[in-house]
Image: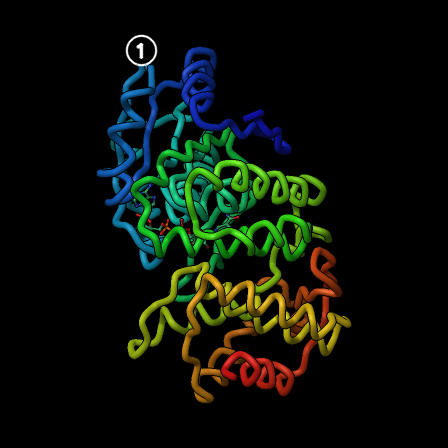
Amino acid sequence: MESISTKNAVVHFNSEVYTELNNYIKTAKPSKIFILVDTNTHDYCLPKFQERIESGEIAIEVMEMPNGEEHKSIDICTGVWEALSEYNADRKSLLINLGGGVVTDLGGFVASTYMRGITYINVPTSLLAMVDASVGGKTGVDLGSLKNQVGVINEGVMVGVDTSFLDTLPQNEMVSGFAEMLKHGLIYDEAYWNTLTHLENLDLSDLDRLIYDSIVIKNTVVTSDSTEQGLRKILNFGHTLGHAIESYFMENADKTPLLHGEAIAVGMILETYLSTKISGLSNDSLDTITKGILKTFSKVEITKADQQHIIELLKYDKKNSHGVVKFVLLEAIGKPKLDCVVSNDLILEAFDYYAN
Ligand code: NAD
């Protein structure tokens, strides 16, 4: 598959990843190479990755963090900054983030801030990280249960997408990543949405091309607007309520935390309903989108009391301006509308629609 050029980096695929990475190491000659993994990617991905990396005389140090969104925190960053310092990382060191979106977001942030910035490369190993988190340069960590509240936008120099890493990814994580692919169809490309919702199952043989197409969509959007002044906001479809739901389920001891994509799937159905009230989406499209999402995602129980707490959390959304929550809604499949203002009553109606 052909490489994709982003604003400052290049995304390579499958065997090209190793050719290009090894070329980069030979040419850039980093003083040291650091690989950040989590518990799972240490066991499932690192051995295969290390087999194919040719670093010559350059030392490689592996840094391992615990897996899971709850570890996407400043405390873990401090641990990684300290490890870099103990291993004498300098400004010519290279950090390779080998993992899902937690590792690529946190590792990208650590690299962007250590000694005011060292070079980093993302090698995403989850579906979600491949199609979404690895491109666009958004890095950062959560602040308690508030998602991505601290971070910077700073792209790495290369992204290496080796889809064979997905062989060991648990099925629920595959489904979670699929939510972002569906979103790419809904905000940008109706034909892509139709292809995805007519797939029989999430089979890796079909996925290679679809992953590629998703990265092209995400890249087209972010390169046209790298600082999120306009078009890039469309990537937030489903995420205004989705992030609030994800945060609420994470901080509430009575709830089982949702995977990112599971929360976004709920958010997309709610925001599709809002689209019929605010941005003129047809009821037929509402029906198609709801069925398309529920084909892959199970319904999540959200009580009336939960709904109030979730609405409360909207005040932390990063798209808010002057205290007003701004939604991305749809006029049609593939046609988003920015900066929509929605009343809390309408959000409660959307929860009723979702429940029924
Ligand atoms: P994750 O990094 O927690 O990975 C999911 C799970 O899969 C983890 O337990 C991980 O250890 C495991 N795993 C990853 N690759 C594996 C493999 N090949 N084999 C076996 N297990 C593997 O979560 P995620 O879903 O990859 O990413 C979610 C994160 O990405 C969230 O924090 C979200 O905010 C962020 N995100 C960032 C952007 C962005 O633009 N920067 C976009 C979307 C999402």
Q: Is residue 46 left or right of residue 317?
A: left
- Callout 1: 10 Å neighbours few (<14), some, many (20+)? few
Q: Where's the N terminus, which quadrant?
A: top right
Q: Amino acid at mark 1?
A: Gly
Name which residue lies at 31% across and 15% down. 58
Q: Is residue 157 left or right of residue 37?
A: right
Reading the image, the residue beneath label 1 is: 56
Q: Nearer the viewer, residue 29 or 209?
A: 209
Percent coordinates x, y for residue 63 in the rendering: 27, 36
Residue 73 visible here: no
Q: Identify the secondary structure beneath mark 1.
A: loop
Name which residue lies at 49% across and 32% down. 159
Percent coordinates x, y for residue 249 in the rendering: 38, 72
Q: Nearer the viewer, residue 169 or 101?
A: 169
Residue 212 falls in which quadrant of the image?
A: top right
- Say above or below: 150 vs 347: above
